[in-house]
Image (cartoon, grey):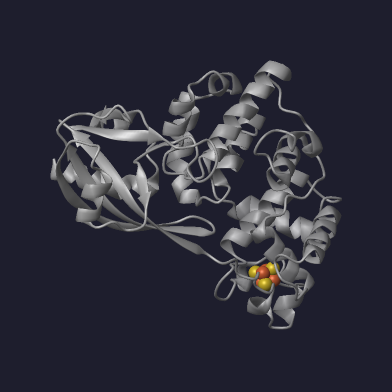
Amino acid sequence: MDSPAVRLLAWYASKRRVFSWREDRSPYKVAVSEIMLQQTRISTVIPRYDAFMKRFPSWQDLASASPEEVAKLWEGLGYYSRARNLQKAAQIIVHEKEGKMPQKASEISKLPGFGPYTSAAIASLCFGEKTPSIDGNVLRVCARYQGHSLSYDDTRLRKEADLFLRSLMEEGDPGLLNEATMELGETICLPSGMPNCDACPFALDCKAHQEGNETAIPLPKKKAKVQTEKYTVLVFSYQGEIALEKRPDKGLLSGLYAFPMKEGHLQKEQLRSALSDFEVVDILPLGESRFHFTHRTWDMVAYQIQLKKKTDLYRFYSCEEIRNELALPTAHRFAFDSVVRRG
Ligand code: SF4
């Protein structure tokens, strides 16, 4: 029987999915795709990756772009701090590293936004470093193959996975082995339901499969508490223009242009008195929505506040400008769509 590494690479050679970022191993393309794929589904990334690459084909193009344009091209991917960090990394690479990505994972991880997983993926894929990149998918495959009944957040599981992957890397291309293990976790050794062991190159010696333990390994993480916060979203409008404010540089949706909000769910009459300093013509409900961040949920109601006169507190934009030039956070999209529908 061939070794696990040989079987894994043979499986990957015939079953790998084709994505544009896999066709060219330039560090820039791999870095952008890896950052986009953090916490975002592949189907969401595909069209946005291509558009991003078209507009910013190199570190230089990204480094010199306006932050607003970068955010606009990031729209729909969420977690905008990734875009800001990626641009900062581009500026460091262009201005301090002669336009070249560092080659070692330990050096790559000093760039803003490049964690251990991403740094190892780039170092192995682009520069052949023997360093495992371990995310939840890879952890699951390794835990099942080795038969470890530990939870995802147990550091021993990560150490065992690291040792196992390093042993595979003695026999094949480190980047391909990292990528193949991820692919196996994403397409065959699935997190919920029964994995497709019949199609798995590890089935012959996978401990969990031999013992019928596939779905019990690894043990789930303890769930972090999700906090729910209530907000009233204010869409100030004046003659077809809408007010946005730049959110603070720290915290959720930091640095993005979004609608002003007030804490709590305010009724129309409460709003009217809270906005007594504004020249309000009418207050119209725009619906409600919930948006889930990693450990927080925003429970929102929205109102359109029609003004007799613009306020100096906010900048006003046309709907076209908001649609084409600014990255309105997905959390507030429902209120914008509702105003646009109203006309
Ligand atoms: S044999 Fe089954 S449980 Fe084991 S690694 Fe493959 S898909 Fe996962």
- Within the image, what quadrant is residue 240 found in? top left
Judge whether 55 appears above or below 85 on screen.
above
Q: How many marks?
A: 0
Q: Residue at x 64, y 60 (%)?
A: 137
Q: Residue at x 56, y 72 (%)?
A: 192
Q: Residue at x 27, y 51 (%)?
A: 302
Left or right: 122 as drawn, with respect to 68 = right
Measured from the top left, where is residue 48 in percent x and y? 44, 38
- Within the image, what quadrant is residue 10 found in? bottom right
Measured from the top left, where is residue 289 in percent x and y? 32, 57
Measured from the top left, where is residue 147 in percent x and y? 77, 74
Q: Residue at x 55, y 40 (%)?
A: 250
Judge whether 334 appears above or below 308 on screen.
below
The residue closer to the viewer here, 25 or 35, is 35
Left or right: 71 as drawn, with respect to 308 = right
Q: Is residue 54 visible?
A: no
The residue closer to the viewer here, 101 or 188, is 101
Left or right: 223 as drawn, with respect to 265 = right
Query: Can you say which quadrant of the picture contains the N terminus?
Result: bottom right
Q: Is residue 168 visible?
A: yes
Judge whether 60 appears above or below 307 on screen.
above
Query: Can you say which quadrant of the picture contains the C terminus?
Result: top left
Measured from the top left, where is residue 310 in percent x and y? 22, 29
Judge whether 216 appears above or below 70 on screen.
below
Image quadrant of ligand 1?
A: bottom right
